[in-house]
Amino acid sequence: MDISVIIPTLNEAAGIAQTIERTRTLGPCEIIVVDGGSDDGTIATASSADQCLTSTRGRAFQQNAGAAVAQGDVLLFLHADCWLEEGAFDALRRALSDERCVAGCFRQTIDADGWAYRLLEQGNALRVQCIKWAYGDQALFVRRDVFQRVGGFPEMELMEDLYLAKRLKSEGRVRLVDHQLHVSPRRWQRMGLIRQTLRNWTFVGLAQCGISPRVLAYHYADVR
């Protein structure tokens, strides 16, 4: 079961080389970096990836571009400020050994101290376990044929992972793998943990009520 790791980037020169290096230690895989127009030298810094592409800015567009050239049986979408602990690929393969499982993600560890972060980790895990919505910052993985069948990420400016999660839920089982994904706390620290979390919930609620992601994106500051 070959794995292609797709990493969307935008001005990630400070950390992308380390993300690629850490991913290499997990075992054989194809690493594809898809840049959305960085001006800080990200592409040059990411030269150790198997492929470095450029595409229209936006994670949906970037991740679809990476998936289009990927050779693996499994696509793993990894944010540039996240990294997986040793054994992650084995855990992924065990989850997908169940033919009913079409996709999954990993259990988050947000690299910051404080009980509020621990509650956030637990809440995100419960979301996957209860309603089967796996988001991008949980290192979503999916069988490539299933990804193609559902049409990939909807090409929208915001919450592409939510809309993909809904499609995947109808295709089969979505598993939360009990293996650690380390996540940078930078977006919560910049906006404030409670403020950022409430904002995210509000946007999801508005999207569920039919508000266009394009309208919501206008009011959402992306922190990468």
Image (cartoon, rainbow, N blue to C red):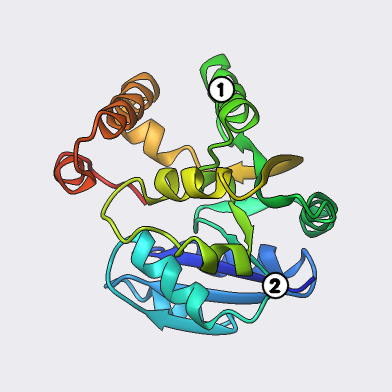
Report crowding for label 2: few under 14, some 14 to 19, many 20 or more residues within 10 A (C-alpha).
Answer: some
Position of the N terminus, as image quadrant, is: bottom right
**Of residues 66 and 213, the one drawn nearer to the viewer in this rendering:** 213
- State the image coordinates of residue 190 (x, y, percent, origin top left): 33, 35
Sequence order check, earlier mark of 1 and 2: 2
Q: In the picture provided, is 62 more to the left or to the right than 169?
A: left
Which of label 1 and label 2 is nearer to you? Answer: 2
| Disc assigned to residue 132 | none
Report crowding for label 1: few under 14, some 14 to 19, many 20 or more residues within 10 A (C-alpha).
Answer: few
- State the image coordinates of residue 44 (x, y, percent, origin top left): 43, 82
Taking the spot 59% from the left edge, 81% from the top edge, the residue there is: 48
Where is 148 relative to 110, above or below? below
Taking the spot 66% from the left edge, 47% from the top edge, the residue there is: 172
**Of residues 200 and 221, the one drawn nearer to the viewer in this rendering:** 200
Taking the spot 28% from the left edge, 56% from the top edge, the residue there is: 156
Occupied quadrant, residue 9: bottom left
Disc 2 target residue? 73
Tell me the kind of residue under disc 2. Asp
- State the image coordinates of residue 193 (x, y, percent, origin top left): 40, 24
Q: Secondary structure at mark 1?
A: helix
Disc 1 target residue? 123
